Image (cartoon, rainbow, N blue to C red):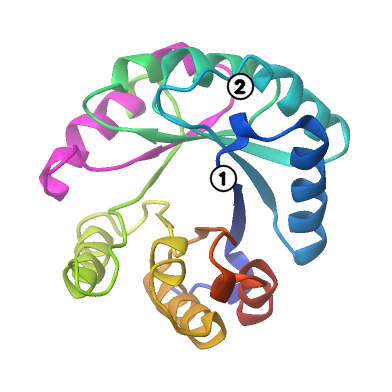
Amino acid sequence: RNYGAWDIEILAEINNAPRLTRAALRTAADYFRASGADIIDVGCTPGLAFPDLGDVVRELVAAGMRVSVDTFDADQMRIAVAAGAELVLSVNGSNIEAARNLAGTGARVVVVPDLGGTIETLEPSFDKLTRWSIPYFIDPILEPIGLGFMASLERYAEVRRRYPEAEMLMGIGNLTELTAADSTGVNAMMIAVCQELGVRAVLTTEVIPWARGSVREVDIAR
């Protein structure tokens, strides 16, 4: 199968969104869209309430943006999708039943391995999603250098071998944010890996100073 570089969608995450003002959220979203992001990812914070989540998603969608939500919380998933979010990150064996409520909405989900588990834990989750007619990406999880980086690349390759037609996502921000080096070359190399593996969506952000500009770099790299 041949994959074109421009088939890669960029998700840009607004980190710690519940702690930001509505104005700051909108500014970040506008900046990421101008930088080349296809989807604005609203990053929720585990254990922190986000009463404005629905309003935030509706505002971004009304402004013509595609929106995803990064949460494991079932209520936040439901609220975000009802407000117009098209993608939920993430589900695994711990919360897969929450995804059942998304059936018929058209929203996609990202499937990750169970915490501490191998890629063998993926299949039970996406078997259920298939039965419920919920489209999904598989994300085997990219690890930082020194914490299993090479093994994580091998997981992506193995998932592609096992499931040659599956849609995949890679959180390349896991590498750029935790590698104390200029991000331009790192992003270029990771987009090359994604192109060759047919990973058609990437998630990144710009929190640490050396990763500022990453969304634009990824846009140029693809």
User: Relative to the observer, which residue lies in front, 195 or 184?
Assistant: 184
For disc 2, the marked residue is: 81
Q: Is residue 94 visible?
A: yes
Question: Which marked residue is nearer to the observer: mark 2 or mark 1?
Answer: 1
The location of residue 222, given as percent across then percent down, is 61, 76
Left or right: residue 46 compared with residue 217: left
Disc 2 marks a residue whose amino acid type is Val
Left or right: residue 85 compared with residue 132: right
Q: Which residues are magenta?
A: 100-129
Dividing the image into 4 quarters, which one contains the N terminus? bottom left
Magenta stretch holds residue 62: no
* Dot 2: element: helix
Q: Is residue 15 above or below residue 37?
A: above
User: Relative to the observer, which residue lies in front, 39 or 128?
Assistant: 39
Q: Residue at x 76, y 65 (%)?
A: 35
Check disc 1: other Cα within 10 Å, few if <14, some if 14-19, many if 20+.
some
Looking at the image, the residue that sits furthest to the bottom is 185
Magenta stretch holds residue 115: yes
* Dot 1: element: loop
Q: Tags 2 and 1 in contact by the CB under 8 Å rule?
A: no
The quarter of the picture where residue 110 lies is top left
Calculate the distance from the C-alpha at mark 2 to the C-alpha at mark 1.
Answer: 19 Å
Residue 15, which numbered label?
1
